Each structure stands twice: as C-alpha cells, then as structure tokens.
Amino acid sequence: MSKYNRIKIMLVEKDRSSKWLADKIGKDKSTVSRWCTNDMQPSVETLFRIAEILETSPRELLNEEA
C-alpha cells in the first residue's frame, strides 16, 4: 500500500501524539490513527488545517513518491 501522507512522521518530529492532533482538530482519535497509518486520508481542507496546527506546509505532509 502506498503511503500518501507523512502525518505520523511530522507528529514524531514535532514530539506530538495522534491523540493531541485529534483533540486540536476535533476528530476522533481512531480517525487520526487511520490517517497516520495511511489506511485512509484526510480531506484537503483537513490536511491544510493539520499543516497549520503543525506549523508546516501542506506539501510537507504529503509523500512525493506515493
């Protein structure tokens, strides 16, 4: 399976947890967990919100080789 996003990697780099992100964006922690494992992908709007919260660009959250 292709890894489309780097959310989990960015969370590790920022020393944050998926539960922390779930709380920040108002999503269930299981949903964020599925994004982190690339079982499903966030919407474009949510991806931009995640980038804002993690103080990075949306491009940094995407795997260019997917």
Image (cartoon, helix red, strand yellow):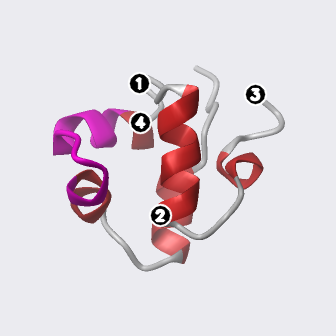
- Mark 3 Cα within 10 Å, few/some/many (few <14, many 20+)? few
Find the distance from the CA under tag 1 to the CA under tag 3.
14 Å
- The answer to whether the residue labelled 1 contacts the one labelled 3, judged by CB atoms less than 8 Å apart, is no
Q: Which residues are magenta?
A: 23-34
Q: Bin the neighbour count of mark 1 within 10 Å (Cα to Cα): few under 14, some 14-19, many 20 and up.
A: few
Task: Please tell me whether mark 1 or mark 2 is closer to you in this view.
Answer: 2
The first of marks 3 and 4 along the sequence is 4
Q: Are marks 2 and 3 in contact (CB under 8 Å)?
A: no
How far is mark 1 from mark 2, CA to CA?
A: 22 Å
Is 62 located above or below residue 38 in the figure? below
Picture coordinates of residue 34, whole percent (x, y): 33, 33
Judged by depth in the image, the label closer to the viewer, 2 or 3, is 2
Q: Earlier in the sequence, mark 2 or mark 4?
A: 4
Q: Amino acid at mark 2?
A: Ile
Q: Position of residue 27 (x, y in %)?
A: 23, 41
**38 in relation to 14, above or below:** above
Sequence-earlier tag: 1 or 3: 1
Q: Residue at x 58, y 20 (%)?
A: 1
**For the residue marked with disc 3, what is the amino acid?**
Ala
- Residue 17 image position (x, y, % from top left): 31, 66
The residue under the point 43% across, 22% down is 40
| Separation (CA) of disc 3 from disc 4 | 14 Å
Q: Which residue is labeled 3 in the image?
A: 66
- Numbered tag placed on residue 53 in the rendering: 2
Name which of mark 1 and mark 2 comes first in the sequence. 1
Q: Quadrant of the C terminus?
A: top right
Above or below — where is 54 with respect to 58? below
- How crowded pointer 4 is (Cα within 10 Å; few <14, some 14-19, many 20+) is rated as many
Residue linked to disc 1: 39
Q: Secondary structure at mark 4?
A: helix
Q: Which residue is mark 4?
A: 35
